[in-house]
Image: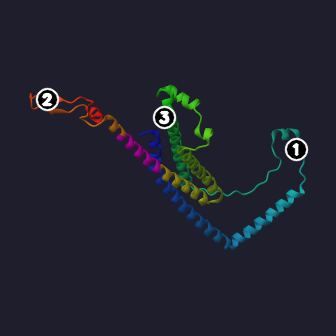
Amino acid sequence: MDAGSNSFTFLTENIPGWITRLDGLTARIRSRQSELSQLADANASSPADRNNSKDGEQLQKLHDSHQRRRKRKPASVSSAASGAQRYRSRSMIVVYYDSAVQEVFEALVRGIGSARNNIRKAKMNARIKNWSPLTGGDDDGDVVRARYLIPRASTRTGEKTIYDTVDAALETAQGMCETGAHQFLRDGDCRKEVEVAKKKLEEVQVLAAEELEKAKEEEKREEEAEAVSKGSPGDEGIEVEDDDNDSEYQLPVDWKQRYARA
C-alpha cells in the first residue's frame, strides 16, 4: 500500500471517532449553557444579589466620574521610553473553563495535524512517482529534483489535486477546533465552530473513501494487465503425437503467426 492509500486509510479509520467526539462536545456545551442560564435566573431572582448589583453599579459610576475629573499628567521621558502606562482600566473577565472540552479540542487538533502530515507526504510521493520516468530512476537524486526543481501543479497551472482539496478541508476543521477552544473560554459556547469542523470532516471522509475505492480499482487493473503481459501457459509450444514413427512432434513457437498468415 502506497503513501496515498495509507493517508486516506488513516482518515477513514479516525474521522468517525472525531465526529463522535464533536457530537459529544455539542451535547456538553448545550448542557453547560442550560446550567448557566438557570444560574443566571437564580441570581436575578435573589434580592441580595439585586442589591449587590445596584451597589456595584453605583460604585462603578462613582469610579468613572472620579477618573474623568482627574487630569492626566504628561508622562515623563523615562516612563515614555519604558512604555508603561500611568493609569490602566480595570474590567472583570469571565472565563468559562471546562477541562473535558479543552482536552477534546486538543486531541482533535493533534489528530487532524497528523492526518495533514500524512497528506503532505502522500502528495510528495505522488509527485516523485509521476516524475521518476523522466528523471531516469528512483534514486535519491529524484527526491532532490522533485523537491527543488519540479514546480507545483497548483502554482503552475492553477489546478488542485485531491491532496490539496483534502488538506484545505482538514486545515479548516483544525482551525475551527482551535478557535472553538478559545471561543468556549470567552463565551461558554462554540457550537458554530464545532458544526463547521464536523461538516469539513464529513466532506473529507467521503473524499477519502472515494480515493480508496479508486486505488483498489487501479490495483486490480494493474494485476490484470500484468497477467496478460505474462501470457497464458502453453503458448511456448504444443506437443502432438505422430502416428507414423511414434515420436513426438513439437510445433514451432511462432505457429500461431504462421497460421494467421496462411
* Mark 3 lies on residue: 129
* Label 1, residues with CA under 10 Å away: few <14, some 14-19, many ≥20: few
* Mark 1 lies on residue: 75
Tell me which amino acid carries mark 2: Glu
Q: Is residue 132 above or below residue 10?
A: above
Relative side of 67 to 19, left or right: right
Kindly indicate the quadrant of the structure image that contains residue 93.
bottom right
CA–CA distance between discs 2 and 3? 50 Å
Tell me which amino acid carries mark 1: Ala
For the point 55% across and 54% down, which residue is it?
200
CA–CA distance between discs 3 and 1? 66 Å
* Mark 2 lies on residue: 248
Magenta stretch, overall SS: helix
Label 1 vs 2, first from the N-terminus = 1
Q: Split into 4 quadrants, where in the image is the C terminus? A: top left
Contact flag, marks 3 and 1 (Cβ < 8 Å): no
